[in-house]
Amino acid sequence: AILACALKLAADPTTNTVPLKIGTIEATNYFDQTMTVTGTVAQVTVHTSIAFLNMDQPYPNSPFTLVIFSKDAPQFGDLKALNGKGVEATGKIKKYHDKPEMVLDSTNQLKVLPADAGK
């Protein structure tokens, strides 16, 4: 019985410390959960106080958006250079105007994938 309980705990996703990897379309199923979302940066929009990285399609059709506030933007370098790149972003998925987004405040949340990834 102890072994069965231990196996059940090991399979329990709430005890998993590695976030599940999902695509941008799936993000709507994981609001308020920490996940790793994978996609291609389709559009980078930089404003004075905020930057938006629209994933897989440009705004307003983007299924998922990465948000970086101006106080955190300098650590990410040239955000425009991410346009067209495949990325993985890890963090909590939030709902904003009924669409999923993730706020990035640290570079360790964003990983640029090699150009040949997925081929």
Image (spheres, rainbow, N blue to C red):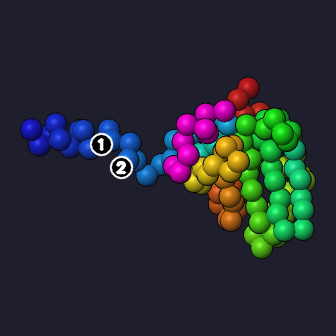
Amino acid at circle 2: Thr
- Callout 2 crowding tier (Cα within 10 Å): few <14, some 14–19, many ≥20: few
Q: Which of 66 and 88 is in front in this view?
A: 66
What separation in Å lies between label 1 and label 2 (alpha carbons)? 7 Å
Q: Which of 103 and 61 is in front in this view?
A: 61
Task: Please provide percent x and percent y for residue 97.
Answer: 70, 48
Query: Can residue 67 be seen by looking at this rendering?
Result: yes
Q: Quadrant of the N terminus?
A: top left
7 magenta-colored: no
Task: Please provide percent x and percent y for residue 60.
Answer: 84, 39
Q: Mark 1 points at which residue?
A: 10
* Tag 2 secondary structure: helix
Amino acid at circle 1: Ala
- Asked whether the residues under the numbered discs 1 and 2 touch, taking CB atoms below 8 Å apart as contact, a structural biologist would say yes
Task: Please provide percent x and percent y for residue 7.
Answer: 23, 38
- Indicate whether 103 appears above or below 95: below
Task: Locate residue 114: give its quadrant.
Answer: top right
- The residue drawn where x is 68% and y is 37% is 24
Judge left or right: residue 79 versus residue 75.
Answer: right
* Tag 1 secondary structure: helix
Please report whichever mark, 1 or 2, sits nearer to the chain's N-terminal start.
Answer: 1
Give the label on residue 15, or none. 2
Task: Please provide percent x and percent y for residue 118.
Answer: 70, 29
The segment highlighted magenta reads 25-33
Q: Nearer the viewer, residue 55 or 114?
A: 55
